[in-house]
Amino acid sequence: MKRPFRAPRSSRWVPGNHFELLENGEEFFPRVFSAIAQARREVMLETFILFDDKIGKELHAALLQAAQRGVEVHVLVDGFGSPDLSDQFVGSLVEAGVQFRIFDPGRSFMGQRLNMLRRMHRKIVVVDGELGFIGGINYSADHVADFGPEAKQDYAVQVRGPIVAQMHHFTREAVLDRAEHKRHRAAGVTGRPHAGTAHAMFVTRDNQQHTSDIERHYRVALRAARSRVVIANAYFFPGYRFIREMRRAAKRGVDVRLILQGQPDMPIVKTAASLLYDHLQRAGVRVYEYCDRPLHGKVALVDDNWSTVGSSNLDPLSLSLNLEANVIIQDRAFNAQLHSRLSHLMDNSCKQIEAVAPSRWNGLRLLRSYAVFHLMRWFPAWAGWLPKHQPTITLAKPVPSDAATDGSAGGAAA
């Protein structure tokens, strides 16, 4: 079954929430798997990457058991990020009653995937409409330390409170047709009991109605910053206006710190970000490179009350093309916890990049930085020229027994 993907509705600030920061797979996976194991009615799960490795198998087992005891289970994976799941992996879930969907499965040519643009990059879980998880962590073994030097440093949050109603509504609207969603529509925000003191906003990015919401909230926070800004982001190459707000904050005396990859999973990531170093440092921004292992986080804090955690990088793909979701949190306790974790990272696992003093020998470097900075201001317009198509969500069907080992789910479900 294929149908057009509809843009979900926007969201608003909601009081009465509680957030708990989860660092890396060691903290994230046990919480998610336990929540699924305790689910009574429903599990909604979206992820960019799901691999059939030890983490994927644990998730598979938790979802399978939930479905077998009568829990309504919906899974949405991205067709580019999760291309190689076997028919057996997906088929066993479908046979148990899991509604397993693939966002824009796409096609391959000579072994190369062609559906690279406008991906479903979100990572969200909602259990029983009451407990939520959101962040940057995928379901793959490279999010736990025993994977080795390439294990990723990343963050997510566990969420309780009224904001979970918005996450719940969003995940259901993304995969169900209008009539089915109306029948199962979640109770309103006021129907969720308060769980804490945090005000929160659930913010998404799509290619229809909410094309710049996440970036806009970042820029508003930077504009309002008075004392400190810490941004830790894996893929950093934002637009002109974002860079301008960072520079302005630093120039008016705000302590602006940027944590980027020092041991990148893709070398071009560090090369691209380094083109911006001179321009940022000359305004007073302090640049740190995390060197223990690849940084995959997408978190930030401003002053002592504003924070954000989610799936959105600060690069052209996330800010102009991909489907993303973040939570923005107004809460001093959470801000202090995140600041403590990031400060520990900077003090123990990062090197600060020293600014290069101007000289006739680095004039070419400064010229290159200047050119890149001003070219970026036009990227949102260029993104509109890139190839467009109507993404679809495909519901995986049961695989005939004689085909159970003959292919991958991406091809079978398409």
Image (cartoon, rainbow, N blue to C red):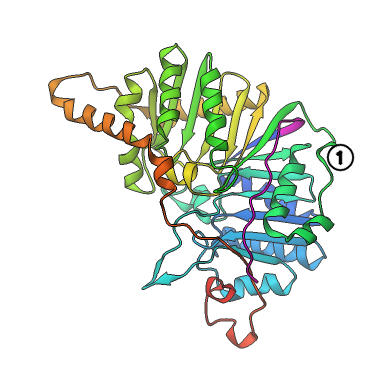
- The quadrant of the picture occupied by the N terminus is bottom right
Q: Which residues are magenta?
A: 1-18
Residue at image location 51% in from the left, 49% down from the top: 322
Viewer-proximal residue, 91 or 119?
119
Magenta segment, prevailing SS (helix, strand or loop):
loop
Q: Quadrant of the C terminus?
A: bottom right
- Name the spot of residue 395 as percent of width and height, x first: 65, 69
Rendered position, 254 above or below 330: above
Classify residue 277 by image quadrant: top left
Residue behind mark 1: 191
What residue appears at the point 54 percent right and 62 percent down from the top-left corner?
51
Q: Secondary structure at mark 1?
A: helix
- Is residue 265 among what the camera can see? yes
Q: Residue at x 51, y 27 (%)?
A: 219
Above or below — where is 127 with respect to 246? below
Q: Label 1 is placed on what type of residue? A: Gly
Residue 399 sits inside the magenta stretch:
no
